[in-house]
Amino acid sequence: MHVAFQHHEKYDGSGYPRGLKGKAIHEYARVVAIADVYDALTSDRPYKSSVPPYEAYKIMVKESGNHFDPDILELFFEHVAIFPVGTTVKLNDGSFGIVTEIEIGKTFTPKVKLIATNDKIAINENISVDLSVETSLYIEKSLDENEIFDLMKTTFNIKFSDN
């Protein structure tokens, strides 16, 4: 009952229905509030398109301490993949890769198989980078569908039909 009744309460007391604040909000309701917003952001809705997990993270972190319990939000993102396995990403050095493995607690520093240089030249060797070890490298962004198609066409000369 507490979860259903309190998951729209906000950590800073500005939520509803009763304007509860902080630890006065049931712990499970504070967890569900985070999951509810994350799901709303990362799912297509009739009135808006979804955002990728890393964008949801940026949006939600801005609300840490206001909308969300900061401790629970931190735990949530330690266990939810910001860049899920299979995500095509661009690294800060301009190279491109595919996320291949994520360790719990290291959601921002997964293992990435490099597939192309910053000049979009294919990397044919099996080079994998552990971003938790290679600390000078980090994921700059995940590629959307159109960027992936462009990378595949440019780098690997793959043709896509217009169908």
Image (tube, grey):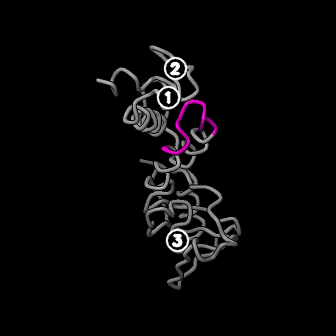
Q: Nearer the viewer, mark 2 or mark 3?
A: 2
Place of residue 109 in the rendered image (x, y in percent of width and height, measured from the top left) = 56, 66
| Type of the residue with mark 2 | Gly
* Residue for badge 3: 112
Q: Quadrant of residue 115?
A: bottom right
Magenta-span inclusion, residue 64: yes
Magenta-span inclusion, residue 70: yes
Q: Dot 3: few (<14), some (14–19), or many (≥20) neighbours within 10 Å?
A: many
In percent of the image, x 41 and y 38: which residue is there?
A: 31
* Residue for badge 1: 48
| Type of the residue with mark 3 | Val
Q: Tell me where the magenta segment starts and ends, as one range.
A: 62-72
Quadrant, the N terminus: top left
Mark number, residue 15: 2
Q: In this orientation, which residue lies closer to the viewer: 161 or 1?
A: 1
Of label 1 and label 2, which has the lower sequence position? 2
